[in-house]
Amino acid sequence: MTFAARHISIAINRPFGEVYDFAGNPENLPKWAAGLSSSIGMVDDDWVAETAAGPVRVKFAERNEFGVLDHYVITASGESIYNPLRVLGNGDGAEVVFTLFRREGMDESSFDADAAAVDQDLHTLKRLLEA
């Protein structure tokens, strides 16, 4: 079974390395990814983010040269949500691409709301990095 997907992207007028370093630092997530967390910290060797639905664990891809910032969000119930996130070189700047999957049981309006939240987060990232 496959799920519907939306690729949400934004161009950022900063070098690839700067965008990757900032977006890939979990401590920066509350600054730009309000859809994920209002705060984040290490608890027993895991990153734990505070969300509107309560605490979640976040597991990130290892640092790499390809711009892969994929991560899993693990809810208190144990549900694991995969979030592909990439930083791509784009000339002198970067393109940030988030792939949003429509999870099983998610209605269209919830999917649209999630997509809007991701888009807002990416615009916040752009504003921070281009300031």
Image: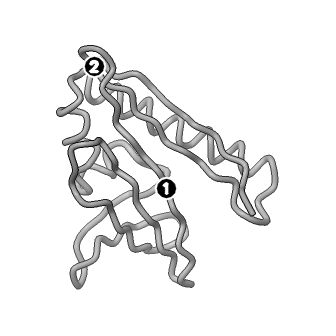
Give above or below for 54 relative to 131: below
Give above or below for 57 relative to 97: below
Q: Point out which mark residue 83 bears.
A: 1
Q: Amino acid at mark 1?
A: Asn
Q: Residue reaching furthest top?
A: 91
Q: How is the image coloured?
A: one colour
Residue under the image location 51 percent in, 82 percent down: 76
Determine which quarter of the picture holds residue 10: top left
In percent of width and height, residue 65 lies at 21, 44
**Residue 18 versus residue 63: which sits nearer the camera?**
63
* Residues at marks 2 and 1, CA–CA distance in whole angstroms: 23 Å
Quadrant into which the N terminus falls: bottom right
Residue 13 placement, left or right of 50: left
Residue under the image location 32 percent in, 25 percent down: 94
Label 2, residues with CA under 10 Å away: few <14, some 14-19, many ≥20: some
Residue under the image location 19 percent in, 42 percent down: 21
**Residue 18 versus residue 65: which sits nearer the camera?**
65
Element type at mark 2? strand
Q: Amino acid at mark 2?
A: Gly
Residue 15 placement, left or right of 8: left
Residue 125 placement, left or right of 101: left
Label 1, residues with CA under 10 Å away: few <14, some 14-19, many ≥20: some
In percent of width and height, residue 15 lies at 20, 24
- Mark 2, residue position: 93
Please count the marks in the image.
2
Element type at mark 1? strand
Quadrant into which the C terminus falls: top left
Sooner in the amino-acid sequence: mark 2 or mark 1: 1
Residue under the image location 29 percent in, 17 percent down: 13
Determine which quarter of the picture holds residue 116: top right
In percent of width and height, residue 64 lies at 22, 50
